[in-house]
Image (cartoon, rainbow, N blue to C red):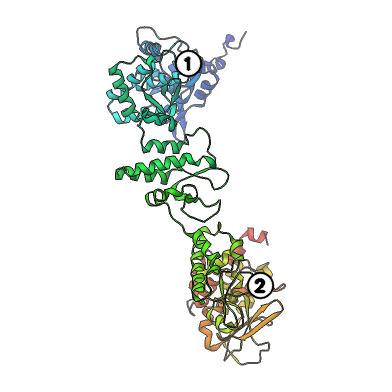
Amino acid sequence: MLRGDRGDTASTSSRSHGGHGTSEPRLFEFGDRGRILSPRCVEISKQHPEEFLNYLQQAWKRDKIYAKANPDSMLDLKALKVLCQDGKYRPLGSCYIPLPKLVYLQSRYMLEGETFPFLRLNPPLKPDGGFGPWRCLRAFARYRDNLDFFLEMLIRIRRQKSPTVEFPRRILELYLRIQAECEDSRDLEECQQRVRDVFEKEQLLYIHPIWRPPSECLMDDLCDMSSTLSKSALFPVAEDWDASKSELASLRDFYSHTLEVQSASFRTILGVLERREFDAPLDPSDLWLTDDFYRALDKLRRKLSPQDAAELRSAFAENMIIAVAPGESVIWLNSSDCTWAPKLDSPEVNDLSKHYPELKDFFTKFLGIKKNDAGLVFDSLVNVASLSPGNTRDDTARGLLVAVSQKIPEYGHVLDKEKFLRSPVFPVLTPDGDVLLCAATMEFSIADRKYLKDAFIGKLNLLDFDPKTVWMLDNLLVWAGLEERYLSRKVEEMGPAEEDFKSIELSGEISSKASQLLRIAVHFRSPRTSNPKATSWLLEVLEHAQVRLVSSFPSRLIYRSGNAEIVVENTLGGLDIKDTVGLVIYVDDENWELLKQTMLPRRLLEWMMTDPDSGDTEEVTELGVSLVRSILNVAPGRDHIIPKMLDAEGIVDVEALNASPYWRLNR
């Protein structure tokens, strides 16, 4: 005997979802967002979907009072799968109650064996047309012969596996019924949009023997445009539709106004380009096809209204409909990703002049695609030596160097660097006073500071540019790897070996700001802060650091190349850092303010970033130099603002860092 046969009430209650128990599980229970579907309800739907409707019928009588206040829970209920008449399980909200009227209409438009999502009800509905005991399902399932109902039938016919549609006139009748539903609706535009969306998504236009979405159709086959554009013409309709003149008129209205199927126009061509409607993926040899489309658009644009012309431009800006072949395959781009760049020969540059040389006006003037002369300018530069020697050629080279430098940020990655370095493009001033066009293989330096040029002119090969304008070449020189030729990087400054000169100490210049300078050293991971002991020692050194002014402090500038060196006097005035016994900075007194703003911040940071054991110097960043300069410039008595300055720049707080258990753990 089963447990239920012995009167086991617990067992009976647990299986009461079928409508046989005395206590149906609740539909809802309280959760974080109010009443939600009860886990038991969800469990029944998953484990016994064939009995779920009977359970819902009973539970709804008690719990429907909670439904109005819980719309999310109602959506969750509609998402539960239930059994349909065809034996499949579908979400309750997408199913239909098999009312006699709906069953009749379904049988009129659909053939036997073509399935429709009618609910399987037990007991079934009576033929009198009422809902009977299933009135509760109106809150969840569909039951009206409205637009959605006729769209659902059309979708079901479309999804049949048959290669063709039997009795295709029913498709015509469904189209006309859908059009009638739209015309009878309260909101015609919303209804038409709904139909368009469904027809596009489900591909519901039937042109024997295939189905296509409206976007892939034309109203009429004008001048054989349909085959050229890989479209399907909707007219004339097939003879087996047996359509009358009035039906054809209504059908044309449905196609043109409700589905918005277009005749051949610039929009049709855009559609082909947007959806890549070609027989096969294009390869570089197939770009004549897109060339034909662009030529057609070039002809059409001259007859467009301002609004249509703006729409055409916008389409190229927003969609990837321009085909280019930078390598061995075709890629698609929008107008902002392309350039008109003759002689910029690189697979990374999407140069339209290479593929569509006769359409310059269409791409540059109409679509506004940017023209770039980087390739032309670069080509002129690497061939500048072919011009006749003289001042004009040298001036041309200077102008081209500046022009190419301006192009480097955007196009440097595609210019031929090796060709550039091999080409004689640099005007170089020799110690003899001659200006020669030289390649980068020749040894020359770049005077990026006036005092350095004044010091070394006539002694070194120097790039013949004024130091005030050398910065215009910085992009180019860095790109070419020539930035190490800057004299500011190659020249060393050296003070006297012996400290046998009189000096006056400037008290507090560094020592009063020691703790804040330490923050910078720690933040940029100075080798002098590699461990707590070293950090403490650096702080102590900074706290006792001295700045001493020396009258006419002697300083030399030393340029080294291989085993040779050139030594000249430093006309700017000297600055020397000694750390043999503590940290002492000697500065020429006449140039103190100048050196404080220029040389001292960088030299002091370089010293802090130098390993005292190996002598190796870590990277000195411009941010670090700027921060040191800012600290040194804070007036006495205003030191309290320095921590705020460093906090604003995100510089680490050493005290907070030392208090961190994670920092101590990793030290």
Query: Which numbered circle lies on residue 379?
Result: none
Q: Which residue is drawn at 43% across and 9% down?
A: 124
Q: Which residue is drawn at 52% across and 21% down?
A: 44
- Whether residue 623 appears in this view of the structure is no
Q: Position of residue 548 (x, y in %)?
A: 58, 86
The correct choice, above or below, for 279 with respect to 461 in the image is above
Q: Name the residue under label 2.
A: 610
Q: Quadrant of the N terminus?
A: top right
Of residues 13 and 324, the one nearer the viewer is 324
Dot 2 surroundings within 10 Å: few (below 14), some, or many (20 or more)?
some
State the residue lying farthest toward the front. Answer: 388
Q: Mark 1 points at which residue?
A: 84
- Whether residue 50 appears in this view of the structure is yes
Task: Describe the element under mark 1 as helix, strand or loop.
Answer: loop
* Mark 2 and mark 1: Cα distance apart in space: 80 Å
The correct choice, above or below, for 659 with respect to 512 in the image is above
Q: Is 13 positioned to the left or the right of 319 in the image? A: right
> What kind of residue is marked 1?
Cys
Q: Is 403 positioned to the left or the right of 65 in the image? A: right
Q: In which quarter of the image is the C terminus?
A: bottom right
> What kind of residue is marked 2?
Thr
